[in-house]
Image (cartoon, helix red, strand yellow):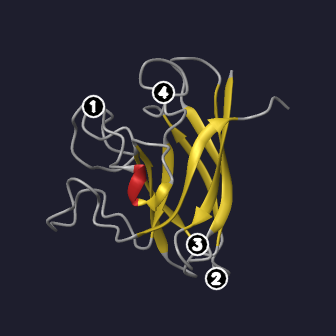
Amino acid sequence: MASCVCVFQAEGSSGVSGALKLSQTTEDGATSIEGQIRGLTAGQKHGISVCVFGDLSDGGDSCGPIFNPFGKTHGAPTDDPSLRMVGDLGNVQADENGVASVKIEDKLVKLFGPHSVIGRSIVIFAGADDTGRGGQENSLTTGNAGPRIAFGVIGMAKAS
C-alpha cells in the first residue's frame, strides 16, 4: 500500500487551505483521494487537477499543465479512462461555509509505477471545470476553470 498527502497553500490572498490523503492498495487498483478544502467560494464548484510538477517556486503557475502522460484531451473523471487526461479530477463542491469534503476514487491516478503522481501537484481552481464540454477555447486542454487559487505537492505520508 502507498499513502501520500497533499497540503494546500493559497495563491495570493485566496485564503484556501486544507489537505488531501491519497492511498492505493495495489498497483492496478484505484487511488482514493480524501480530505477537506476550506476557504472556497460558498456553494460553488471548483476545478481540481493533478498537475505535472511539484514545483511551487512561482505559485500555481510553476505546477505546470494538467498531468497528461498519454496525450489525451480534457474530460471528466467519469469519462472512459482511455479518453481523458490522468490529472482530470473534475470538481469539488463547496458547502455554504466554503468547505469541500472530498472523496474521489480514480483508476487513472497512480501512486505506483512509471506514471506515479508522487512528487507532482494538485491544483484548485477559482471556477468550475467544464470537463472538456464547455465549447470554450481552453475546454479541451484545461477545462476553462479560471485562475489557480491553491496548490500543494503530493508527497509520501508517514505510516500510521
Q: Name the residue under label 3.
A: 94
For the C terminus, the quadrant is top right
Are the residues at dot 3 and dot 2 in contact (C-beta closer than 8 Å)?
no
Q: In which quarter of the image is residue 111?
A: top right
Which of discs 3 and 4 lies nearer the camera? The answer is 4
Does residue 85 lie above or below 9 as drawn? above
Query: How would you rate the neighbour count of disc 3 (Cα within 10 Å): few for under 14, some for 14-19, many for 20 or more?
Result: many
Q: Mark 2 points at which residue?
A: 96
Amino acid marked by disc 2: Glu
Where disc 2 sits, the SS reads loop
The residues tagged by marks 4 and 1 sit, at their Cα atoms, a distance apart of 17 Å
Are the residues at dot 4 and dot 1 in contact (C-beta closer than 8 Å)?
no
Amino acid marked by disc 1: Ser
* Residue at figure coordinates x 34%, y 71% from the top left: 146
Compared across the picture, whether 100 is left or right of 82 comes to right
Amino acid marked by disc 4: Ser
Q: Earlier in the sequence, mark 2 or mark 1?
A: 1
Q: Can residue 37 be seen in this view?
A: no
Residue 74's spot in the image, x, y percent?
A: 26, 49
Tell me, for residue 82, which label it has, or none.
1
Q: Earlier in the sequence, mark 4 or mark 1?
A: 1
Where disc 4 sits, the SS reads loop
